[in-house]
Image: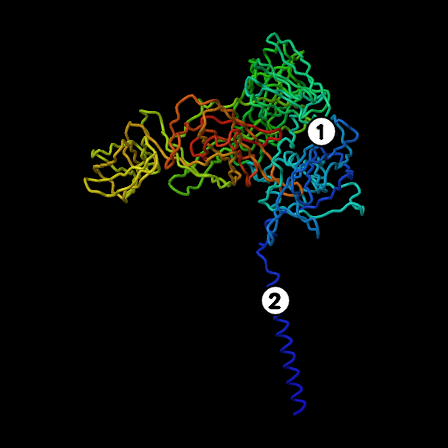
Amino acid sequence: MRMLGRLLLLLLGLALLAALWYAAQLSLQALQKTDVQPWEDSYEQSTVYILQPGETFEFDVPNEATQLRILHTPVGVVADDEQATLQFTARPDASLSESYSVMLYGEEAPVGGQLPGRFFDSPQDTLAGITQLHVVSFAERQSLNEFALTLTGSSRPVAIRVAVLVQYDEASVSRMWQRLNEEQKSRFFEDHIYPVELVPERERAARLMQRWQPIGPADASSERINSRILFVNEQAEVFADDEDQITDELAVIGPERWFTIDTRVQTNLQEFACESLSGAASTELQLRSVTEAGESVVTPVRLDAESPRAQLPAQPGLYQLSARARCELVFYDANGEMVSADYNYLRASVVQPDSSLTFALVPDARQAQPLRLDARRLTRRGAAPAQDLSLQWRIVDAAGEELLSGQLQPQLEPNPYQVSVDSSLVSTVHEKSSQYIVAPAHSAELRVSLSHAPATMAGQVLVNLYTRPADLAYRVEPGNEDEPQQQSIPKWFLAYPMLNNTELPVVTQLISWQMPLPEPAATAEAGVEEQWYTLTSVNEAPYFELFLAAGERGQQLEVTADSAHLVYAPVAGDGSRYVVSAPGHAQKVRPQLVYQKATDAPVPVEIKLNGQLVAKDWLNARSGRLFLPALAQSDYTLTLTAPTAVQWYSNYQPVSAQPHYRVRNGYKLTQALTFVVDKTAKEEWLTFNYFPAIAAPHQLTLTLEKQEQVGVYADYTVAKRSFPLAAAERSPSVVLLNQNQAPVWQPIRLPFLLGRDLAEGRYRVTVSTSAPNSGYVQAGYSAAVPLYQIEIYTEDGNALF
């Protein structure tokens, strides 16, 4: 019995200890619980190197690199804004050296129990500031083997990330391609018009030869260099809103680099300056122009601390800027606001007199291949171009047998708005000649050559080839009756020639031009035929309803089942006939009444249908909207009684020749609005309707941003367009519903194309204004085909806006 009692006591003790252990675990779990959300799926991580104030990091640059991207993130947050300097010292070409401004923005620490948007894996100084980006581009004549980064004037260290754009050889590309699985291969060519197996081998190799590669300091293994992991939330801002830190290669000038502007096209360019000029430094520039007689005029310009800006000539024309030292050009308008010199550029191949250009086609295509061959003359200014110059093109199969042939005669008429970047202003670019070719399904190559080369050629012939899918319709799945069914917009894709028989690189010329800014009076008004996928602002901006004319007076518009509820027409409201018409609707509909009156004071109104009182309400604003009860399609008499004069409009009205109106939804543009676009691999049009609310001149800017992985996912600017808007001349006519505010002006329509060559993914479009509270913005995917289509390609063939 004594043994049994001891055994029971032992079991009871063990049970008590287990209960105490379980209770302690529950207490610990309760103490450890916070409101922190799981972050593994929403944070990107990258390795960074901590650069202390006064310290220097040395980097070795691969021989194949052509561009650097330097990102720096402050360690910790400061109470007030600070500014430091990051010195970039290049070797052996010291002309690439630069001093970058490092901004440390004052931020508030996150609330306890919440993960910050950016942080380090460190027991101390875990918070991270806002990341900034610097781009270093260098041409073939410039050499960059190594560089150093030195931080000065900073109270805190910064985390450094560097990536280089590396050119791989064919052997490396071949090995890399063999290691990829089918899904990875498809991802590389997801924007291509043909399946991966049909992409020509040389075109595939050209696509894979350039890749971004992160690099660390030369002595990264040293104990003095600390590395950490930086976590950045995908929704957190990772770049400072300081776009002048991102330098475009073509906007950088020097002794052998120049930039062309056309003030006939961009009339808002007034002044220019060197953004890279700092302190007491000075630089000398040359402003070149060409007279009508073809004479070159060179004007020296000196910029220093006392005169940091210079005026552009008042006479509109084509001008060229160069400098004795490296200079990052920036431009200003008449109000002193910074504006971008929007340019487009296209790389064209030169047809040599003694050889031909060969373009790879798809030999296994199951259908005919549409092609477009473009040719331009490039002549020396003042020289007489050859009159009988023509191109000979031939399409051959895989065995070299000719399937089709023809000729193309380049035009003689000069194009005054296009210039050759490589040949400066001493050359003339002529108008483009195009020929549409339908290649047979089993075509392998297109070969282009000069039909006969003159003894002395006064210039060159430039060629571009474009391909287009024959049966690739642009389709949008409908979500409701107010969205489009489908739309077909053919798009041409730029093709590049293969290496010639001597394996020498193809000679090319870079052509640049500037697009004319749209005139507000020339833009199309938003009509009733336009339908939308509406884009929602991510800024939680104030939302308003605008009532405006849908078309010109006297214009008869078709009212269908898709648009009957969108179109409003004037109604009398004096007991006369009131017809409810809804084509395609068998069920009842609920009409809406829009009113306008001259006073702000609320007034009562009585609504009668067929003499019967159906509602009493108040008209609380100068304009607003009321709802009628559900009505069957029929004829009624409508009586609207109010103590003051009121103008009435109603939807669900029959077709007539009287003016039509509609309600638009718009966000108030206080300073900037941001819209998120989930682009597919197809081509998509975005349309922005801007309703100016002020009569004064101001500027509207649209910026397209994309996330790119450079060690960490970060937003960078893809394209940026500025639109200077002149002072409004007509009287305002667009009414804000339920708001006692003055009317605004008719909308200015800005359509933009996101081409198929623009990679799919999430983009942000930011609409900003130079004048606060300047108007209202409506954004959406437009169903109506725009009045014009602009094809803009970057040098590598990617379509932008």
Q: Please give the residue where the numbered disc 1 appears in the rendered image.
A: 138
Q: Quadrant of residue 498?
A: top right
Residue type at mark 2? Ser
Q: Residue 7, how many percent across, how many down?
A: 66, 85
Image-quadrant location for residue 169 = top right
Bin the neighbour count of mark 1 within 10 Å (Cα to Cα): few under 14, some 14-19, many 20 and up: some
Residue 110 vertical position relative to residue 440 in the rendered view, above or below: below
| Residue tagged 2 | 27
Q: Nearer the viewer, residue 555 or 325?
A: 325
Residue sitting nearer the eye, 494 or 68: 68
Q: Position of residue 168 (x, y in %)?
A: 71, 36
Earlier residue among tags 2 and 1: 2
Indicate left or right for 507 with 576 as reference: right
Q: Are marks 2 and 1 in contact (CB under 8 Å)?
A: no
- Quadrant (top left, top right, bottom left, bottom right) of the N terminus: bottom right
Based on the displayed image, in which of its 4 quarters is residue 580 positioned? top left
Q: Amino acid at mark 1?
A: Phe
Instruction: Report the side of 400 relative to 552 (left or right).
Output: right
Q: Position of residue 729 (x, y in %)?
A: 42, 21
- Is disc 2 surrounded by few (<14), some (14 to 19) or many (20+) residues within 10 Å? few
User: Which is more foreground, mark 2 or mark 1?
Assistant: 2
Q: Residue furthest top?
A: 293
SS label for mark 1 = loop
Q: Position of residue 145 (x, y in %)?
A: 78, 33
Considering depth in this image, is 363 or 549 the residue closer to the camera?
Answer: 549
- Dot 2 falls on a residue whose secondary structure is helix
Alpha carbon distance from label 2 to label 1: 61 Å
